[in-house]
Amino acid sequence: MNKIQLIHTLPNVFQNRTDIVSDIWNQDVTFEKGKMYLVEANSGTGKSSLCSYIYGYRHDYQGKILFDGEDISGYTVAKWTNIRKKHFALLWQELRMFPELTAWENVEIKNKLTGYQKKKQILEWFDMLGITDKLNAKMGKMSFGQQQRVALIRSLCQPFDFLFVDEPISHLDDTNAEIMGRIMTAEAQKQGAGIIATSIGKHINLEYEKVFNL
């Protein structure tokens, strides 16, 4: 996939509002593969909704979303399954990890489905992010910042054309945020992929093609 377009897209909950000032809602917006974008927003302006719409997780919007010129509204479950397995990687704001499983098991589940990353690479990321000692720790016993780092690793265990990261460093110190940025950028460049990051304040420092104000 090379291009994502939003054509006058707007959450249904905003449809009767006349005070919407946004670079994305009700606009014509294009995200291109291989480029990095930042979506800055205030809380409650639809930041996570944007990710959910593009990911096909929610459909409560008006307007259109196109993938390489094709309207996604008619996509089948099988089509979405293929897209999420081969074209889109996503780090959810709420992470969506399995708290009863270990950090390694959470990552391993994803990587067994895709068979994409080698164990050596995954362990290298754990080491770079300073959580090697948490490999066998239950996710539910780890801090949210530690869980964010594990969630990033899990999101990279697949092929993708676009990587979506929803507030990926909200609970990280500057050092780990910088390391996370390096890892994301390197893997995206390796795959020739784009990155779409969101933030309501603290954002990850990348070489963004464009910054949108939601």
Image: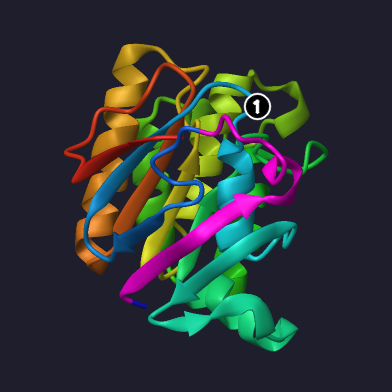
SS class of the residue under badge 1? Answer: loop
Residue at numbered disc 1: 44
Total numbered labels placed on residues in the image: 1
Of residues 47 and 6, the one nearer the viewer is: 6
Quarter of the figure that contains the N terminus = bottom left
Q: Position of residue 166 (x, y in %)?
A: 52, 38
Which residue reaches farthest right?
100
Residue drawn at x 54%, y 34% is: 20
- Horizontal relation, residue 25 to residue 16: left or right: left
Kind of residue at disc 1:
Gly
Q: Quadrant of residue 162?
A: bottom left
Residue drawn at x 60%, y 22% is: 43
Q: Quadrant of residue 57?
A: bottom right
Please tell me whether residue 185 is drawn above or below residue 129 in the rendered image. below
Q: Is residue 76 visible?
A: yes
Of residues 112 and 45, the one nearer the viewer is: 45
The crowding category of the residue bearing disc 1, from other C-alpha atoms within 10 Å (few below 14, some 14 to 19, many at least 20), is few
Q: Position of residue 136 (x, y in %)?
A: 65, 36
Of residues 167 and 68, the one nearer the viewer is: 68
What residue span does the magenta drawing correspond to? 2-20
Of residues 167 and 47, the one nearer the viewer is: 47
Tell me, yes or no, whether the highlighted magenta stretch contains residue 3: yes
- Horizontal relation, residue 6 to residue 76: left or right: left
Please tell me whether residue 146 is drawn above or below residue 48 in the rendered image. above
Residue drawn at x 21%, y 40% is: 208
Q: Is residue 115 visible?
A: no
